[in-house]
Image (spheres, rainbow, N blue to C red):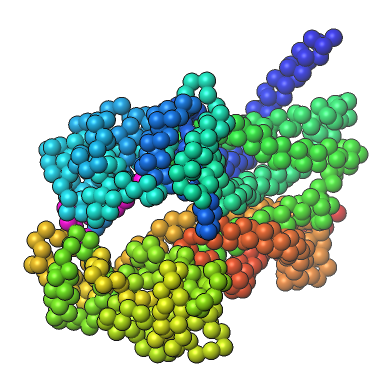
Amino acid sequence: MKAVSGQYWVETFIQDVRYGVRHIGRSRLHAAAVVVTLALGIGLNTGIFSVLNGMLFRPRVTKDPATFVHLATDVLEKNQARQPDWPFSAADYHAYRASARSVGNLAAWAPAHAPIDNGSESALLMLVSCNFFSLYGLDQATAGRLFRDEECAEPGSAPVVVLSEELWRSRFNSDRQILGTIIKLRRQPFTVVGIVPARFAGRLRGRGIWIPYTMQAAVFNGEDWYGDSDAHWLTIEGRLQPGQTREAAQAELNVIASQLDRQHPGRQTTMVVTNGSMVDEPFLRGKLVWLGPLIMGSLTLVLLLACTNVTMLALSKASARRQEIAVRLSLGAGRGRLVRMLLTETLILAAVAGAISVWMAYQVAQFFENQAEPVWNLAPDWTAFAYLAGITILAACIAGLTPAAESLRVDLAASAKDGDGLSVGSAVRGGVRNILVGAQVAMSLALLTGAGLFVNAQLTIFSEDPGFETRQVLVVGLGGATSAAFYQQAIQGVRGLPGVQAVSPGEPPPMFGNEGGVATDEVRSPGSPTDSGVRASTLVVDAAYFDTLRIALTRGRAFREGEHAAVVVSDALARALWPDQDPLGHTLQSSKGERLEVVGVARNTKSERFGELDGPRLYRLPAAGSTPDVLMIRFAGDAGSIEEGVRTVIHSLDRGLMPRPRTLDDMRQEMALTFWRLARLVLFLGAVALLLAVIGIYGVVAFAVTRRTREIGIRMALGATRGMVVRTILGPGMRPVIAGLAVGSVLTIVGVYGLTQVLRETPLAVSTLDPLVYLAVAIILLGSAAAAMLGPAWRATRADPVVALRHT
């Protein structure tokens, strides 16, 4: 009996497939519209899911990712705050490598930057242990060789480098004679011994140069971190030994960590062994908790919009098949059997759309791989294909069940007379279609608002005054120089150039190269207890800094040369420490215990995040004898001539330096273009949502007008004007649109909150409280909906009353 039942199901399914294929062949235009709409929704979803899966849930290794481990730490030191993701010292690395039995091939690495051949542009360096390449699955270089074990045995003994193929092509013009030649990193000679292939998985920070980690002091101005057991600067990764688990490895490594902590009284280390993915990192989980749901939520809205459009197309098709369904029911066909038959047709179309979506998913993943500077393996895997299969079936069910159910709501008597046998007319007036239109508008509102906020933020980047001069200020790097006399001669020479108005050695604003913009230094009133003060960011600048960047002083003056105990504070810091007092003359205490006198108050700037005022800030002179990395030069006139003059002056003082001056505005525009890539993606999703919503609204109204042709003709025969007819159509049509705006507002609030959480620690501050964005999006949606309705409404006004009366 079960075998017969199973055979019956197979036979009827084959019949449904054959019938579905024949029916699709008779309505190819409708089928093409369904396939394209579903493919757009499913393909985008799967492609972005694959990107998120590759970036967040997979380790960045291509060889045997199941055994890869990343060591993360949580360190609590005496009298200090807990430090998540605390790096390792070289001594710690050697201890773990010697003692651990559950993990092997432990490798260490750390990023750095240094100018190549004394140029002003810094290149990315990766200081690595010599087994780093084998850990990331590379056994042989494209040209030359990789590091040998003995080159990581003694500090400073192996000045050799390996180049990435991308840097070899762009910086060294694919010179095949580069092997064995000398290049200089921060004026230190290194021999090129190899080139690694393009897209190597170990290109963790971008195209750059690998050097043995034992050469650390050479590229850090002689600072010896390698030999300092208290210097934490290394990341450690490795492979599980056969038969071992991450849990077992974590337990063993925590025992070793406890033993090492005894050598550092007051330190307590907790070790976490992860699989190397971003989402598995303890200190990143809180930051990523909103990212996946926000992105996939947006794409799910696009998928639901596509399904809603297909549903409305199918509902219109169902109305045309009312006689066929009535006949089948009259002949005794079961309603469940008919639902399965109708749903099979949608499943066939969804399967075709799913096949197209496979191609789209690969294209989307490839696009993001090409955009990302570090290497990410984003190609779809079995997880992505399982997701694709799941959402294809889900989309088919969402798009097909409602039309199938509506098709069965047939008045057999009316259908036999060729009347309105379906209850679709009532659905148009106040049922299923209105709900679908409202849902489309609600989802479109959420997506368009996100796009509007990003576009508004992008416009802010390009147009907003940051509070300091950017167009007429050049920044020139001098990282390759070491002599204090050189700096004085360079400053004097540049000041003598025609058009130069001010020169300031020191740190540029945070987003333009200074890593010290984070508010980590506590300042407080003298005698106050620790943690009772204000966290502020500190910029080390000279007395000409404020004049060079034209940062206005609201009170007091700038410090003078040699006035090392004097500081200038920002308005934000002054209000935080002395809200109702004049800050001039007050003394504050730094986190190092120094007592500093406030001589001036500078206005707040917007240099840490685009579109947001900086937090509390402290400006002070550099320590005696220190040398700056950059010069900032305010000029009048054309930047090109000043740039050439600056290069000439510096090159005349040191033939080895090849500076590349750039304006702050050029650097700002370059960073803005990086964010524009993200804004374009969000804008594209918003445009797709708007297009799908407009198409859906047009289809619903056009179908409704077609069903009401007789009614409209009679109204016109009884004296109704064209304006009255248009209002008759627009009034009911706009109700679900307005309802959708109301529901979409709630959805938008949730989405905007998630957006602010995701962007909270990025340089881009998206203003979520700008009423103009919300008003503009609502007007766009209302206007687009009205425009979609006007076409069918205008056609309705041309209905011939005589023809309508003949059919009553």
Left or right placement of residue 502 versus residue 509 in this view: left
Query: Which residue sits at x=23%, y=47%?
Result: 170
Left or right placement of residue 538 versus residue 653 in this view: right
In the rendered structure, which segment of residues is drawn in magenta? 110-120
Where, quadrant-wise, is the C terminus in this rendering? bottom right
Query: Which residue sits at x=82%, y=52%?
Result: 431
Q: Nearer the viewer, residue 220 or 738?
A: 220
Q: Is residue 525 visible?
A: yes
Left or right placement of residue 172 versus residue 94 in this view: left
Q: Quadrant of residue 129?
A: top left
Q: Can residue 783 be seen in this view?
A: no
Q: In this view, does 750 lie above or below 419?
A: below
User: Is 112 covered by the magenta stretch?
Assistant: yes
Q: Nearer the viewer, residue 305 or 635?
A: 635
* Rendering coords of residue 497 (x, y %): 14, 79
Query: Which residue sits at x=47%, y=65%?
Result: 520
User: Is 357 covered by the magenta stretch?
Assistant: no
* Rendering coords of residue 316 (x, y %): 72, 45
Query: Which residue sits at x=70%, y=41%?
Result: 399
* Rendering coords of residue 280 (x, y %): 55, 41
Left or right placement of residue 785 versus residue 190 in this view: right
* Rendering coords of residue 765 (x, y %): 51, 66
